[in-house]
Image (cartoon, rainbow, N blue to C red):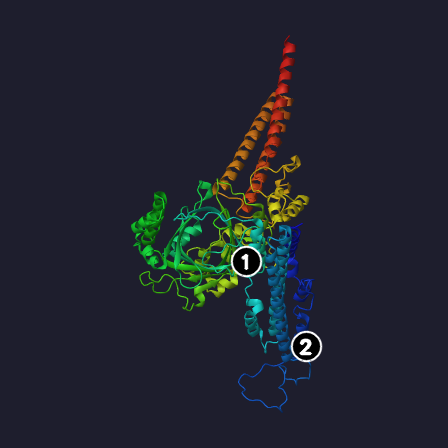
Amino acid sequence: ENQRSYIEWFIHSHCIQGQRQTQAKMKFGEHLKANISPEYGEKPYLDYSGLDDIIRDLAQMAPSGADLNVRYTSLTTPPQTNAQGLAVNNSSATEESFLKMVESELAKVEQFTLEKVTELRNKINATEAKVGVEPNTTIMTLADEIAEDFLRVEKYVNINFMGFHKILKKHDKHLPNNPCKAFYISRMHAQAWVRGDYSDLVVRLSQIYSTLREDHVAPENKDASQSFLRSTTKYWVKTEDVSRVKYAILRHLPVFLQKTSSGESDSQFTNSVYVDNDQLELYHGRLDKSPGAIALRLRWYGVGEPTTVFVERKTHNDKWTGEVSVKERFMITDAEVQQVMKNTYPIAQKKQEMLAKGKTQKEADEWEQLVREITQVCVSKQLVPTMRTQCMRTAFQIPFDATVRVSLDTNLCMISERGYDLDDMKVWHRKPNWILEQDEIHRFPHAVLEIKLELKGGNMTPPKWVTDLQNSGLLYECHKYSKYCHGCAVLLPEDVQSVPYWVDDVSLRESIIASGGSRILVDGKAPGANMVYDHLLPFGDVTDDRREAAVGRTSASVAASKGLIGAKADNAAASAISFDNPENMVYYNDEEEDGDGNQLCSWPFPFCSNHNYSDAVMAPTSIQKIEPKVFFANERTFLHWLHHGVILSTIAAGVLSFSDASGETWGEWYALALLPISLGFCMYATHVFLWRADQIRSRVPARWDDPFGPMVLGGSVVLILFVNFVTKLYEISQFNKEEL
């Protein structure tokens, strides 16, 4: 019972995702009416139809624009003629009436929003007072209700925010002589109902859920090198879905507040300065995923100048080699950054200080090795500050327990660190008071979610709630997305030799052009990997714009990728919504599904079998890893089947020719039976080769072998040979009888 409200919310959000394509074709007035919350009614919402009526009346009058050079007016002079040169009729619809109504509607929405937020804070105060007094089920229900109310308020804000954008755009379109959109959009962004940060509600809800779960703080990692072995999956999240994603996470993980955080917000200002050389060697290594490719960055938390800086090194390794990617880091002060970059850092002295503080010899030796490797590579590769990523990071994690860690980066932007005097590495990042040019900063339009699972004994099975979140339709997977690579490609287009595939996503196009990176874009079909893998771009390219209708990874896409269609897919989707049944865990492996998954009648036509999937629903790229040798293995298997088919046809032709010469009727029947089987071998080989190549291309995490085709073809050959053997035995026995 205590989970019902959350499940209802989840189903509701799931349905909204499924309706996006329909809403994209709907007029906004109808869309607004369809999304009015029954709890609020129509009154608090923007009067879109009333403003639209005024615009239509004004458009018929065709008012002329004001003369901006006139400095005087007369109270006894009638108004000037309209844009058509005709006298203006007296009408109740005037530009002033439209602007007054816009002002009134803005004030109404702002007041209603602030009232609802105040009510939410009062509810949280009351719920916090009941923790430890009322039963946990009651507290959980109250917390879920507060979260639902908050999401309802955010939906109210978003629908009205979009409404003002739409109506102001419509005004300027029909009344080009009196534009007002730019002014009111800027004013709207300055009002409390838009710019207000209500994330303190998220923090307090997280604390309530954490108390109910009885989370325990894990021991802090005191290792000086702080190495991490983990698997990371990255997703894009639409701005309007950020709160829903936060709520889905905080029910299972608390908001992890860093020591430097004030605790008043659920996010923390995070800066990372990446270093590279003039050839962008580290950028191209990370982009190409070269074995052992590294990324070096200087990270600090909080606003203002950094005091504590983390020097971090990320090393890429391919999983199929048996190694995993590693993140290592150590802490220094702001004043010591120059020493690290110039390889003058007093390593021996720092090591002795560590030993004096109680660190073990092994920890000190590992720290020394890491620091020496980083300082030496900075000098040998002539690394300098190149790109900075800046964001508000919300971390969800049980303190100091990295088993499951989720981070959500909002307000993400990339800043170029090129073009200023480094002063012998004394200056290693842009100062806050420096003015950034348009081509020196890029604002990423989506939030970025990272799900990080700690490697323990090779067990990478995520918890069920993580799988449910991945399949919620709110997350758009971007395989191997890198903030650093994206920033370099957009802000340093003249220095890069290649760009990541995701820059062709249509949702990024406007922001890339605004940052001066248009030269990396193409006008037609996205080239490279995007021509082969259509599902790599979450929102499509310019020739296939899916921004309005796109839905993230869902249980339906997972079901389709596993070969479940029809009723089975519906059952899988229904079971994925439940957050309580442990049997609904989705595992991605190569094991065959139980039941009637494979049927004998399906093997000749794999495209129509139970392994089929929808071309519109592609498998997540991180589920099935593809190695280059897989393509060649498919070709070799195809050639082997053809080889055996040719051998059978050769044998059949030989038997047929000898049987004609000797006049044996049975030999002719035997040869004629082998010929269609040899032809079946060749047809089967061609068909399975094409089917398996398509499976490999789309990375479908299902069985890529056919367990019945070889059995049927091989059985046919065995049957023919057995009949031939029995026939020959019969002929021999008859011959012996005649001899006797």
Residue closest to the eye, 344 or 636? 344
Q: How many marks?
A: 2
| Rendered image: mark on residue 299 | none
Label 2, on which residue? 57
Q: Residue furthest bottom?
A: 76
In depth, the one of 180 and 587 nearer the eye is 587
Mark-to-mark CA distance, 1 and 2: 48 Å
Q: Residues within 10 Å of mark 1 (few under 14, many from 20)?
A: many
Q: Which residue position is annotated with label 1?
A: 203
* Residue 619 appears in the figure: no
Residue 372 versus residue 527: which sits nearer the camera?
A: 372
Q: Which secondary structure lies at badge 1?
A: helix
| Badge 1 or badge 2: first in the primary sequence | 2
Determine the residue located farthest toward the front in the rendered image. Answer: 133
Q: Position of residue 675 (x, y in %)?
A: 61, 30
Q: Position of residue 674 (x, y in %)?
A: 61, 28
Q: Residues within 10 Å of mark 2 (few under 14, many from 20)?
A: some
Image point 63% across, 21% down: which residue?
Answer: 664
Camera-side mark, 1 or 2: 1
Looking at this rendering, what residue extends furthest in the top direction?
740
Residue 633, can we see it? yes
Question: Looking at numbered disc 1 in the image, what kind of residue is underneath it?
Answer: Val
Expressed as whole percent of the image width and height from the top left, the position of residue 729 reads 62, 17
Query: Dividing the picture into quarters, in which one does residue 703 lie?
Result: top right
Q: Are marks 1 and 2 in contact (CB under 8 Å)?
A: no
Quarter in which the C terminus is drawn? top right
Q: Give, as a three-letter code, the residue at label 2.
A: Asp
Which residue occupies the foreground of this view, 277 or 8? Answer: 8
Circle 2: element type: helix
Q: Is residue 80 above or below residue 479?
A: below
